[in-house]
Image (tube, rainbow, N blue to C red):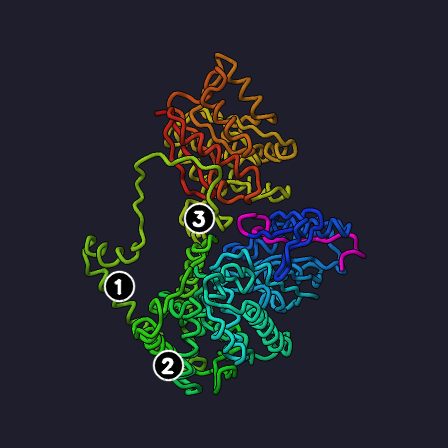
Amino acid sequence: IYRPLGRCVIILDDKLMDPTYTNGLVGITTNHRVVLGMALEGGENFEKITIAEQINRYFAFHQVEIEVLVRSGNEADKDIENVQKILIELKKLGVMRHEPVLVVGGGVIADIAGFACALFHRNTPYVMLATSIVAGIDAGPSPRTCCDGQGYKNAFGAFHPPVVTLTDRTLWRTMHSGMIRHGIAEIVKMAVVENRELFELLEKVGPKYLVKTKFGTDLESLEGSGITDVKAFNDDCERIVGLAMESYVRAEYGNLWETHQCRPHAYGHTWSPGYELPAGILHGHAVATCMGFGAYLSWKHCGWIDEAQCVRICKLINNLELSLWHDIMDDKEIFHSCTKKMVQKRGGNLAAPLPRGEIGECGYMNDITDDELGMYLDEYKELVTKSGIFARNGYGVEVHLADVGLGETCHEALAHVRAEIATDGQHSFCNDDKCSDKKKQDVNYMMVEEEKKDMCSNELSYNEWIKSVQADRNSEWNYNVSFERAPNTSEPPHYPQNTLFNELTEEYATAQTSVSSSNVQTAAKITSEEQLFAPCMVGTLESQFLKMFAKSVKAERVLDIGTFTGMSAIAFAEGSLAAKMPAVVDTLEFDKTTSIAAQKIFDNCEPQVKNAIKLHCTNAVDWMRTCADDPNGTSFDIIFIDADKDNYTQYYELAMGADGRRPLLAEDGVILADNSLCALLYDTDDSRRVALHHFNQVVKDDDRVEQVVLTMREGITMISRK
């Protein structure tokens, strides 16, 4: 594929570069990778290298230039922002429409990279080299590419199948056992509704050895197991993978664009997409809970299978150490919202695939009320968690993302789901001719219940309200008082979002904040007219905070490091003037184009504000050193740091008095460092992320000062001498 093109653009799962996670034994002289059944020749030396390095050597041997884009394969990063980042990189590399991208990784990479290829040039081909079970038999060959959104699994996507999918189970050898287990769920679904032989093979081989040997790729682990015919075992593993792929492709490729919803391979995917992310559980465990519940519905609600078949299906899931139950399923509100979303997704029908007749056959359930669903959920929980039939009371092994070392999704996803449910409740009223009586009754019932809650809350004293209402809301609250200084770390913790707050939070806070002054509004308008990057402005919330802070401390002299277009300088000038102080704001901007726009804005401000601001187009470090070297120079009541992040520590040290120089900060002055929490928000490979984290720790460890980090916008650190 790639030799005629002369290059290969690769989107690579970041885990494939980690020698502790994925490696293989490779001949030093021959570059031959050791695979199943291959004897190690006595004269050959072998070394362990990552899959990423194996790919490098492969293309080097064939003299094909490679461009590698490394992306996170974590569920927490399976969002539209990461799809966009891939698109930007493909554009930078000038990928052409006839040039297949090589996607190497697991299910998350298969989904987001495939989605990016679908969007780029509207149809860029790609080859899928699957390195996990989910990618190998499901996400890899699938025509459906996607990403998560708004707390819902695979909310956005496109139909865009790969031109080739390569599934090599020898690559699964070094996968985490929890990832092997969760991948098996995608095989179980095909066994239950499509392939009886596959189901019986899974029962025969046994879950213990599928996970332990990682699908026969680690045969040494069979020692002492009692399995004597290793070849037969290995053949069974190969057969399981082959049957799973055959069943999936047969089901998928007869309905490539989902022109109808009779899709057996969606078994286990009716309710689970709505609670997988809020629960923070691995995809396979979410699917398994939904498969078990689906089997129960087939027995109890539809009468399509009998009790023995239902228990047999659940037994297989349970024996594979997958989850039959997760406690998020107790939340009926979330579960019913899952039904609503799936009906929307499937074009007005639930079309839930369930086992029907014999194992290996499928039917589709369309009709079930919320009341019935809730009743069956309670019965199903009783069966799988309390009957004593199932090991671990129906719970799985290594269920959560954190259990296998992956980033969590639950907090943000749960917030999205709760907000959506609340919004649905607010907008559930409808006209008589468009609503059923049942729906109107439900709405009226909800109104009465809410009124009851309000009445109860109003009748309680404040302390009683805290105990009865707020205690539940804060059941997961952790002690928020620190008792010792936090240890230093080499880098900040992983943070999956690129903003600190939900948009609604900031919009609400802004709506309750004083309207920006005419001066600040002028800054916003001219910044936009000059086509400068408006998000760099401090905005209404922060400018009002800066104004009120300057007013409160009665600041006379302010040093504003990093003017941009002057909104912070204006805010400080307004605050000092409001306190009846002789305001002087020195503001420093290095970029000439930006400083010209800033001066234009200052010239259009009210005279008092304009006259209070002194703009210096210069290097901030040089200006500060010159000022510090002057024994009669100015001391500043407020020093606001909001310039290039790589120099934050240097600005701080000059403010406090560096290299024997005079401190620029007045004795009772305050330093405000903006964007200090961008140490969490910037990309992991961004030097500014590391620089900000270093700055935060320098301040934390400085015994001369005390400080507090405010979670306003992107963080403001307030620092003063002790």
- Most extreme residue toward the top, as rendered? 631
- Give the CA separation, mark 1 to mark 2: 24 Å
The tag on residue 546 is none
Image: magenta residue range: 1-21
Q: Nearer the viewer, residue 529 or 88?
A: 88
SS of the residue at dot 3? Answer: helix
Q: Earlier in the sequence, mark 3 or mark 2?
A: 2
| Residue that carries the numbered disc 1 in the rendered image | 454
Q: State if disc 2 and disc 3 touch (CB < 8 Å).
A: no
Residue 316's image quarter?
Answer: bottom left
Q: Residues within 10 Å of mark 1 (few under 14, many from 20)?
A: few
Q: Amino acid at mark 3?
A: Thr
Q: Quadrant of the N terminus?
A: bottom right
Q: Residue at x 19, y 56 (%)?
A: 464
List x then y, in percent, for residue 678: 50, 41
SS of the residue at dot 1? Answer: helix
Q: Amino acid at mark 1?
A: Asp
